[in-house]
């Protein structure tokens, strides 16, 4: 059962600042606000400046709900608690001294139990051609407890009203009386509907304006005060310090979360409050609606968000990943993350979103849509945090696929659908590229990696330390390992060819680049292994961790300076000279002598 005693809807208020103040006041007093342009049966109060011919107003009248002026909320906020509603009921002046309260008669009848609604015992055949208006009239009639049928009605239905728009002569031949839809207003307000000048309409979408038109000059101060207030509370109040099965926040409560309030706050420009509501509602099995999170991501991309907002958004995303990991969830959760993890404006997929984040960190203008420039420090860290989030997601999927691979090796009959349907697989390989390591996205990633390594070296004193090259190298390590594990059992030669192609591609795109890379580390005599080792899975993996520890793209010497690059001389020499015979031999005999098999066993 809903714990709220005051559940509000708002209609007819076009001033966004006034609407924002009302929503904030409702929440401050412990009420609940439901947005949207249609009437919601769960509401208890409707805030409206005057009698309107809107769906919400007519439905609230028919249902016997409180219909009040905005002063009710504003005065209650000043009072510190909810006031009595009756003095604030919407009234209509019908003469010099007389006043008509259009809702009071129906509200009193419903409150005393005389009626359940203004249309009780009505059995209506609704004949309206336009689908949107037909749905509106149906909601309106059902709010007043009428039973609504489509034409033709059931044979056992005793129809009392036929309501049509327009009314035609052939409709009048039916046994039940036929009325125009304006009869609804006539029944609710009688002769006073002439004074009210009502015509049934829908809430105009013209009331909606872009959130970017809102003045945020005072909001920043309010947000700062709100954050200071939260920081003064006990730390266990925050979700990240609670266990997912904490008795004070049981998991069953999560299934009752209503995100309509979040959507309404976003409509009013209350992005921080909306994020805070989502933050406290992230539980296993609960997925906030994608449009809400996409709106918050789009707001973050605009460059107007504070660092506190961006940090909290990153925390919400991480909590969402921890509580609902896609590699342990049904396909619906994977589809959810696929829709969420893309540019909220362009919606072109995961890789363009990733590429945009990388390009922004590189101060490149090659993004899916124009972003604020020059690169803002807060947005640099935001996009860097996005890259870290994607990396955690892909690392989790790689671990899951590795576990499945072990079960397959042990003969447990586990399906490999998790690998083919993973987000990592769909991000970097199309259906036509899955037999090659060097897909279009992988080539773009390696190019960005070389560019990041170059900038990290040449502009290390000018740029913020984002460790972008290290992050992209982690990406490359994960996707290469993922691709090798997926194809190694079926086609070892394909894996070896893919690794060789990757090594050659690196050598080609690195020619002429000023990279702090490969200085003595990839020579044939080096303990790190030669570039031709990349054509052999066992040696590739054995040298992988050592290369990571020593920084593949350079190592600091004792003075703290990076070594001067040699422009991949060793890589070029390795391409001219064939690899040693020991690396060209085909594995033979039993599995114990097969280096590729030993590499695969190490994966287990």
Image (cartoon, helix red, strand yellow):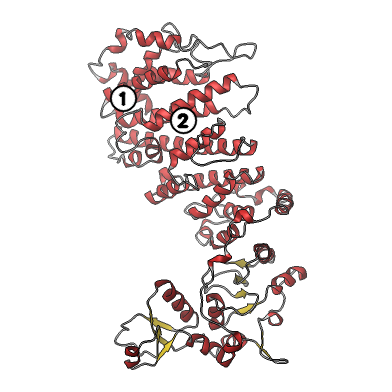
Q: Quadrant of residue 121?
A: bottom left
Q: Would you place residue 147 above or below residue 263 in this image?
A: below
Q: Total label count?
A: 2
Quickly name the residue at label 1. 495
Under circle 2, the secondary element is helix
- Per the model, the C-alpha gap separating discs 1 and 2 is 18 Å
Question: Can you tell which mark lies on residue 475?
Answer: 2
For residue 35, side relative to residue 482 (left or right)? right
Furthest residue toward top: 525
Is residue 177 visible to us here? yes
Q: Earlier in the sequence, mark 1 or mark 2?
A: 2
**Which one is nearer the viewer's eye here, 372 or 391?**
372
Residue 229 percent across, percent down from the top left: 73, 52
Residue 243 makes an appearance in the image: no
Q: Residue at horizontal 26%, vertical 12%?
A: 585
Residue 235 position (above or below residue 159): above
Q: Is residue 574 above or below residue 186?
A: above
> Helix, strand, or loop for circle 1?
helix
x and y percentages locating residue 262 in the rendered image: 57, 59
Label 1: how many residues lie within 10 Å, few (<14), some (14-19) or many (20+)?
Answer: many
Identify which residue is drawn at 43% across, 17% down: 543
**Horizontal placement of 186 versus 130: left or right?**
right
Q: Which mark is residue 588?
A: none
As drawn, the residue found furthest toward the left would be 589
In this rendered view, identify the residue nearer to me: 158 or 213.
213
Q: Quadrant of residue 28?
A: bottom right
């Amino acid at each position: 059962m809903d714990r709220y005693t005051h559940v509000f809807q708002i209609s007819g208020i076009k001033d966004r600042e006034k609407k924002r103040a009302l929503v904030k006041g409702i929440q401050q007093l412990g009420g609940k606000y439901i947005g949207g342009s249609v009437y919601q049966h769960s509401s208890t109060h409707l805030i409206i400046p005057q009698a309107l011919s809107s769906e919400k107003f007519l439905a609230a009248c028919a249902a016997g709900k409180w219909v009040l002026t905005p002063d009710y909320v504003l005065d209650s906020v000043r009072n510190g608690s909810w006031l009595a509603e009756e003095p604030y009921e919407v009234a209509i002046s019908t003469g010099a001294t007389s006043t008509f309260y259009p809702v009071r008669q129906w509200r009193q009848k419903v409150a005393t139990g005389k009626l359940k609604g203004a249309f009780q015992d009505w059995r209506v055949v609704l004949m309206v051609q336009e689908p949107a208006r037909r749905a509106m009239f149906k909601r309106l009639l059902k709010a007043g407890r009428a039973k609504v049928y489509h034409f033709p009605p059931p044979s056992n239905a005793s129809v009392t009203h036929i309501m049509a728009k327009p009314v035609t002569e052939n409709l009048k031949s039916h046994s039940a009386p036929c009325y125009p839809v304006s009869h609804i207003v006539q029944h609710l307000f009688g002769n006073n509907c002439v004074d009210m000048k009502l015509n049934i309409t829908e809430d105009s979408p013209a009331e909606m304006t872009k959130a970017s038109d809102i003045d945020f000059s005072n909001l920043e101060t309010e947000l700062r005060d709100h954050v200071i207030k939260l920081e003064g509370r006990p730390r266990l109040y925050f979700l990240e310090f609670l266990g997912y099965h904490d008795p004070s926040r049981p998991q069953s409560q999560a299934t009752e979360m209503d995100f309509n309030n979040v959507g309404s706050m976003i409509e009013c420009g209350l992005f921080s409050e909306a994020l805070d509501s989502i933050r406290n509602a992230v539980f296993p099995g609960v997925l906030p609606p994608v449009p809400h999170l996409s709106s918050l991501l789009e707001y973050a991309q605009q460059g107007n968000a504070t660092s506190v907002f961006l940090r909290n958004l990153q925390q919400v995303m991480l909590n969402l990943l921890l509580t609902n990991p896609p590699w342990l969830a049904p396909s619906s959760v994977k589809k959810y993350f696929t829709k969420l993890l893309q540019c909220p404006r362009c919606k072109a997929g995961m890789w363009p979103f990733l590429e945009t984040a990388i390009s922004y960190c590189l101060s490149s203008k090659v993004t899916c849509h124009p972003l604020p420039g020059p690169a803002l420090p807060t947005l640099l860290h935001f996009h860097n945090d996005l890259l870290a989030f994607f990396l955690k997601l892909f690392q989790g999927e790689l671990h899951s696929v590795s576990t499945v691979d072990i079960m397959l090796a042990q003969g447990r009959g586990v399906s490999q659908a998790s690998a083919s349907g993973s987000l990592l697989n769909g991000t970097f390989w199309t259906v036509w590229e899955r037999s090659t390591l060097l897909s279009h996205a992988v080539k773009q990633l390696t190019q960005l990696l070389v560019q990041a390594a170059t900038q990290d070296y040449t502009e290390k004193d000018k740029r913020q330390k984002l460790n972008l090259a290290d992050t992209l190298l982690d990406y490359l390590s994960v996707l290469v390992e993922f691709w090798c594990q997926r194809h190694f059992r079926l086609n070892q030669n394909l894996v070896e060819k893919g690794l060789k192609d990757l090594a050659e591609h690196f050598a080609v795109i690195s020619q002429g680049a000023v990279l702090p890379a490969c200085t003595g580390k990839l020579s044939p005599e080096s303990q790190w292994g030669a570039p031709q080792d990349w054509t052999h899975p066992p040696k590739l993996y054995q040298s992988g961790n050592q290369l990571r520890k020593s920084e593949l793209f350079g190592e600091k010497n004792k003075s703290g300076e990076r070594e001067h690059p040699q422009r991949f001389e060793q890589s070029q020499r390795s391409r001219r000279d064939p690899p040693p015979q020991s690396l060209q031999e085909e594995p033979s005999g039993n599995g114990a002598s097969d280096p590729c098999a030993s590499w695969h066993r190490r994966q287990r």
